[in-house]
Amino acid sequence: MPKNRKRRTSSKENQNPNISFVKRILRGGFISAAIFFTLIFLLSLLVVKTGVSDSMQNIFVFFFALLSSFLGAFISLRKTHEKGLLSGILTALPTIILACLVLLVVLHTLGLKTLLMSAMMLLGGALGGIVAVNK
């Protein structure tokens, strides 16, 4: 008689749900940061070539912050069906931290525009998380 073999479970089945939650958050934060800094780079090229005004630059940065956080949260959370608001906000946090670190290195200070950019990132992440979970 053949021995009863235990069924092997995949690594995803054995994974702690908290670990997979953190992985989703970090993956979304990485996607968001990559999109945000790519868009900022493209904006800098546009500013050099066309001379976009300071007020328009701020509008673009706020829009890019909202868009990148929305996309990062949506892409990383589209397969889950729970905790959309919380996950989306947490997805925006790594991008906010990274952007603040870059601004501190470059400008040596953070100001009101940084606070507004962070608020836009949190809003975009929250919206992206809600839309991803409820799609």
Image (tube, rainbow, N blue to C red):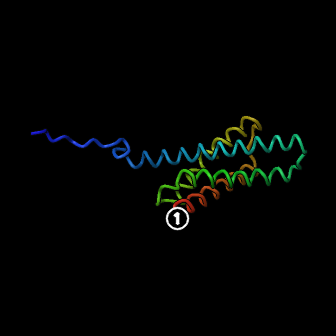
User: Which residue sits at x=70%, y=38%?
Assistant: 102
Measured as percent of width and height from the top left, residue 101 is found at: 67, 39
Q: Report the residue at 73% width, 45% height from top.
A: 39
Q: Position of residue 24 (x, y in %)?
A: 50, 48
Query: Which picture quadrant has residue 63?
Result: bottom right
The quadrant of the rendering that contains the C terminus is bottom right
Residue 41: name its quadrant. Answer: top right
Residue on which disc 1 sits = 134
Residue at the outermost front position:
1
Q: 105 above or below 27?
A: above
Give left or right: position of 129 versus 36. left
In the image, residue 23 sits, relative to residue 84, either above or below, namely above
Q: Residue at x 33, y 44 (%)?
A: 14
Residue lying farthest top? 105
- Give the crowd class for mark 1: few <14, some 14-19, many >=20 residues within 10 Å: few
Residue at 49% from the left image edge and 55% from the top image edge:
79
Location of residue 108 in the rendering, given as x and y in whole percent from the top left corner: 75, 37
Q: Nearer the viewer, residue 52 or 94?
A: 52
How many numbered callouts? 1
Q: Which quarter of the image is occupied by the N terminus?
A: top left
Please state if 68 lies on the left or on the right of 75 as rendered.
Answer: right
Callout 1 amino acid: Asn
At mark 1, the secondary structure is loop
The residue lying toward the viewer, choosing from 42 and 125, is 42
Instruction: Determine the residue located farthest toward the left in the rendered image.
Output: 1
